[in-house]
Amino acid sequence: MLALQGKSTAAGSSFGQYLVSSDRISASNLMQARSEARRLNCSLGASLTASGLLSGDELAAAQAGFTGLAFVALDEAPPEDSVCDLFDTSLLLRYRVIPWRETGGTVTFVIADSDSFTDFLNHVRLDADAVPFVFAAPSDIIDWLTTHHREALTRRAAARVPEAESCRTWERHTNGKRLALTTLGLGVFGTTVFLYPRLTFAIFAVWAIATLLISCMLRIAAYSAEISAEPDDAPPPCPAHAMPRISVLVPLFKEREIAGALLRRLARLSYPKSLLDVVLVVEENDRLTKETIAAADLPPWISVVDVPEGVPKTKPRAMNYALDFCKGDIIGIWDAEDAPAADQLETVARYFHHAPDDVVCLQGVLDYYNSRQNWLARCFTIEYAAWFRLILPGMARLGFAIPLGGTTLFFRRAPLEELGGWDAHNVTEDADLGFRLARHGYRTEVVPTRTGEEANCKAWPWIRQRSRWLKGYMVTYLVHMRAPLLLLRQLGPWRFLGFQVHFVTALSQVMLAPVLWSFWLVLFGLPHPLEQFVSRDLLMALGLAFLAIELINALINATAAARPGLRHLFVWVPTMHFYYPLGAIAAYKALYELVIKPFYWDKTKHGLSLAHLRKRQGSSAASDPGIELQPGHEGL
């Protein structure tokens, strides 16, 4: 029954000759598309649509004409209610099929492409010879599915992650309850401080000192593990016939400045377009972004998914919704302002091809391309360089589970869907997912492919962004520590220790930073609140120890800044001491929001570097600073 069944048949001469004889493509077009289909082991249709020779709707109509089967308009002949819900909507969206009619116990499907339908039948284990079908435009199929299943898809996007592993249960605790508990806690704390001020300060000081020392030991261990390791040999390239289809989600929200630059950067990707599926994820009521995209000439391998209005309005909810629309077996994430390396997807394909099955996530290296813009951008770039080039890979080498960065992430699709995608209510869904992967026995590897991002270069936007990250860290820690014994059993003692060290020290250091700052009083010969409990000599020793820790941090930052492409930042390393206090302000904002609005997504505004360069050089200059300013690939 499947006249075009299988990739080999779809790339065969009869259908291709039909396309030529019906003047849909030329003979030379057919030869090129057929050659690419054979080389990449993809369908002829995928090659033709990716090159723009045929649209998806035109391909479906051509297949209907070739097979002599009906080409239906779903607005005139919609699927029957009795059969349209026979299969999971996520499968129907992925393969662009719908159960359409039932006659004598046999279900007829409406499909967009014979090769995708074959893959669908293999997935659900149906006999292809016993399944009748007709064709419809893929745009009609998607429109019908998203309209008919709108409420279900919207609910699912907010609740894909199992409840036991999500923070969405906090919705049951109203703001009033949280405020009452917080007020009670603040009352107890205030009373304790009033009655025992020095003792309270001493307890916080001991905790701050202990977490500072532990954090320093972790950084030294990770730094040493990374710089002492032999460089990993890059695996050989993935053979062309084994290259996977890769879908990349690009969430966008109120992006006018960055959208044009993003499309130019995506156009520079060298991965075969027949195997590339870029999905721009847009909120349906975001007129600003939708109008900007509508004015662009999108290539056929880029599609747009409108996310229905719903709560919470977060990036992970949008990605959960868009995940079902992806065609690939590998799912990637880029942010709106990202400038990925042109060969990044080849690197991803290479590492996944040679990686063991338990490696289900690859994390790329993130850098900032506007590091010369101002002092804050320089410091942010140094911080990122130290984290992604030294500390994060060092933690991985030590065998710890690692928190993921929010972009340049690539997942094997099946495990990602198995875990429920992203927690829509967690504003650091990336860090949360990294540890959920580890809890379920999966691993993440850091790979040497670089993406340029835009550094937040203004103080208040920086604080807003960092407060969102810290709030998410607080939420992630509380969620995973609901059942600490289960977490210990799933992670094992070593990775459980790493989890505790990472989160407890990171949050304690920013929350208790003012306590640690007080020790500068000792170095300047001024009285300190702890003199009642310890000797002046011990306080002086602690002050010197803190100074040594500052030097260790400076060494790590200097090592990162000494890499090619970042050396202009080396002289700015000593000023990092004045950068870190911003984190304390962000931490208290995060703590406030944890109580008042835990799911609020304080969005980062992108495109500031574009506006900055246009202002300096004129509107016609620097049309794409993300490409022009990004450093080379050496020393990753």
Image (spheres, rainbow, N blue to C red):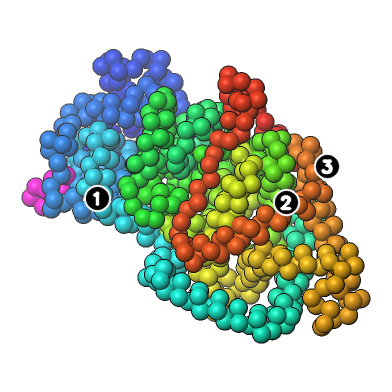
Helix or strand or loop: what does disc 1 sit on?
loop
Q: Which residue is mark 1?
A: 149
The amino acid beneath tag 1 is: His
Please, what secondary structure does the residue beneath circle 3 have? helix
Check residue 184 in the rendering and tell me which mark sits there, or answer none.
Answer: none
Percent position of residue 133, x then y = 19, 40
Q: Mark 3 packing: few (<14 Cα in 10 Å), some, or many (20+)?
A: few
Q: Residue furthest front?
A: 194
Residue at 65 percent across and 80 percent down: it is 193
**Residue most toward the bottom?**
195
For the point 79% across and 37% down, which residue is it? 568
Q: Quadrant of the C terminus?
A: top right
Nearer to us in this view, 115 or 149: 149
Q: Is residue 476 visible?
A: no
In this rendered view, identify the residue nearer to me: 406 or 53: 406
The disc label shown at residue 571, or none: 3
Q: Magenta segment, principal secondary structure? A: strand
Q: What's drawn in magenta, residue-wise?
A: 100-108
**Residue 213 visible in the picture:** yes
Q: Nearer the viewer, residue 211 or 186?
A: 186
Marks 3 and 1, how far apart at CA: 57 Å
